[in-house]
Amino acid sequence: MSATRIDGTALAAQVKAEAAAEVKELVSRGIHPCLAVILVGEDPASQVYVRGKARDCAECGIESRVIRLPESTTQAQLLDRIGELAADESVHGILVQLPLPRQIDEAAIIDAIPPEKDVDGFSPVNVGRMQTGQPCFLPCTPAGCIRMIQSTGVSIDGKRAVVVGRSNIVGKPAALLLLEHNATVTICHSHTQNLAEICAGADILVAAVGRQGFITGEMVKPGAVVIDVGINRGADGKLHGDVDFAAASEKAAFITPVPGGVGPMTRAMLMKNTVQAAARQAK
Ligand code: NDP
């Protein structure tokens, strides 16, 4: 069997087109969605991500404001900047690009973003709302994973889903969203015993580990949907996922590639959240 590739780039284009249509409708009512992205320091990967977000905004008709602060920025200075953006009614979404320099407490910063502008969905209020099934901003990567699974036509309902990884930004929320869609969910992590065996029983397998080739072909159930969140820079200088793509493709029914899979979808879901933030704040 050779798996069907889930094209994250094509699906992201579709999601961004939906966002652009929603922006048009908002603009016709005098609402101009705006995303503020704060970048502290010179981290090269963060610079690339921030440029990408500005490009996505332009594509969707969303105004983007990039606030660049020096590496030496203090926590108090960053909190002040967030406070200004929080009070600015023309800004609908606020995103602080992570990681932050060592002198800044990430949790305190995320906490300072008002929940109604927290388009990353990382603030404790949004996390709590998601957990209790209330309206919230879904974190972009897990929301993108769900959309990718849905795009296959395979129903999540009643399926056995395994998520490898339990981070607050990917693993845990991905597991929770799968549960919301009525999957029977197992979360694996670095203390899990019989991990290979557990993965091999998964109808839906989500890998968010951060280790190249961690999921081997033997760990994939025939006919499974495999979502590879991992982004790892290989010895060859190229980007690789957590899944051995060639071997897993022989077993899975559907699989996401890296690059061109979850990454573009994550960015597209951020545009959706920003539009949603503008619409909600206009009410
Ligand atoms: P973290 O490092 O925060 O979490 C990794 C998780 O993997 C942890 O829960 C850890 O377990 C688990 N893990 C690590 N080693 C093993 C092991 N040997 N066996 C079992 N479990 C293990 O990473 P993130 O969740 O932030 O990111 C995961 C990957 O996804 C990274 O490659 C990252 O770059 C990528 N990513 C991609 C995004 C995209 O848009 N495509 C967005 C965000 C992340 P434990 O908790 O026990 O330590």
Image (cartoon, helix red, strand yellow):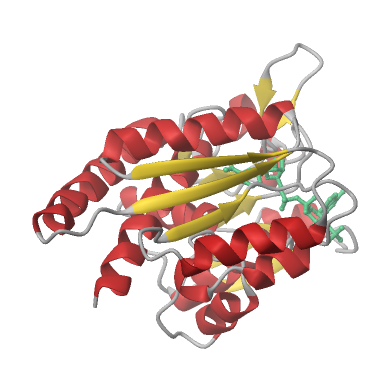
Could you say where residue 229 lies in the image, as x and y percent from the top left? 61, 44
Vertical placement of 81 versus 219: above or below?
Answer: below
Vertical placement of 275 versus 116: above or below?
Answer: above
The residue closer to the viewer here, 135 or 154, is 135
Farthest top residue? 236
Residue 244 relative to residue 160: left or right: right
Residue 235 relative to residue 154: left or right: right
Farthest left residue? 28
Vertical placement of 114 versus 56: above or below?
Answer: below
Could you say where residue 110 lies in the image, as x and y percent from the top left? 67, 65
The residue closer to the viewer here, 143 or 28, is 28
Q: Quadrant of residue 137?
A: bottom left
- The reply to whether residue 137 is visible in this rendering is no
The residue closer to the viewer here, 103 or 172, is 103
State the quadrant of the C terminus: bottom left
Q: Name the residue: 82% across, 53% down.
A: 74
Number of numbered discs overlaid on the protein picture: 0
Q: Name the residue: 52% across, 83% down.
A: 129
The residue closer to the viewer here, 74 or 13, is 74
Could you say where residue 157 lies in the image, as x and y percent from the top left? 40, 72
Vertical placement of 160 versus 93: above or below?
Answer: below
Could you say where residue 21 lies in the image, as x and y percent from the top left? 16, 48
